[in-house]
Amino acid sequence: MSIRRVVPDVRSKVLEESRDFYGLLGFVEVMNLGWVMTMASPSNPTAQVTLIGPDATEDLQPDMSVEVDDVDAVYAAVVAQGAEIVRSLRNEDWGVRRFFVRDPDGRVVNVLTHR
């Protein structure tokens, strides 16, 4: 298994203002679905922050996202170890396959692969 990137997921009640703030730090918007947007460094595209707005499609929001090369293999590994899956493995309309798992301290991790 290979990790492609790790991204903090920041909840925001004011998505556009948050986008503007992170823009001051040098990030540019690279994805925007209305309720979630990703900001990335123009010089290092894997340096990212994801902003999640109040009208997100899930009640439970992740604290971080980990993009891997084989989400099915990671899912099998965490299930085999008895980790708490809080959102089952599935394909999303926006082109990712993902699941949510809770870490030992209770943080929710979004594990995904782009399809």
Image (cartoon, grey):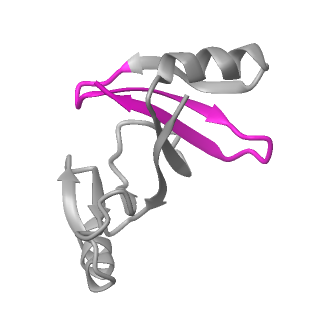
Identity of the residue drawn at 39% across and 63% down: 47
Between 113 and 43, which is closer to the camera in this rendering? Answer: 43
Could you tell me which quadrant the N terminus lies in?
top right
Residue 52 placement (x, y as % from top left): 38, 54
Q: Is residue 110 above or below residue 52?
A: above
Residue 38 placement (x, y as % from top left): 29, 56
Q: Is residue 27 above or below residue 82?
A: below
- 23 drawn magenta: no
Going by the image, does 49 lie left or right of 87? left
Between 87 and 75, which is closer to the camera in this rendering? Answer: 75
Residue 103 placement (x, y as % from top left): 72, 40
Labels in figure, total: 0
Magenta stretch: helix, strand or loop mostly: strand
Going by the image, does 93 lie left or right of 107? left
Identity of the residue drawn at 67% across and 47% down: 107
Which region shows up in magenta? Answer: 91-115
Identity of the residue drawn at 43% across and 36% down: 58
Going by the image, does 47 lie left or right of 3? left
Query: In which image quadrant can residue 18 be found?
Result: bottom left
Identity of the residue drawn at 27% across and 76% down: 17
Q: Residue furthest bottom?
A: 24
Q: Is residue 68 above or below residue 64?
A: above
- 114 drawn magenta: yes
Going by the image, does 55 lie left or right of 112? left
Could you tell me which quadrant the C terminus lies in?
top left
Query: In which image quadrant can residue 102 be found?
Result: top right
Between 43 and 79, which is closer to the camera in this rendering? Answer: 43
Q: Is residue 19 above or below residue 99?
A: below
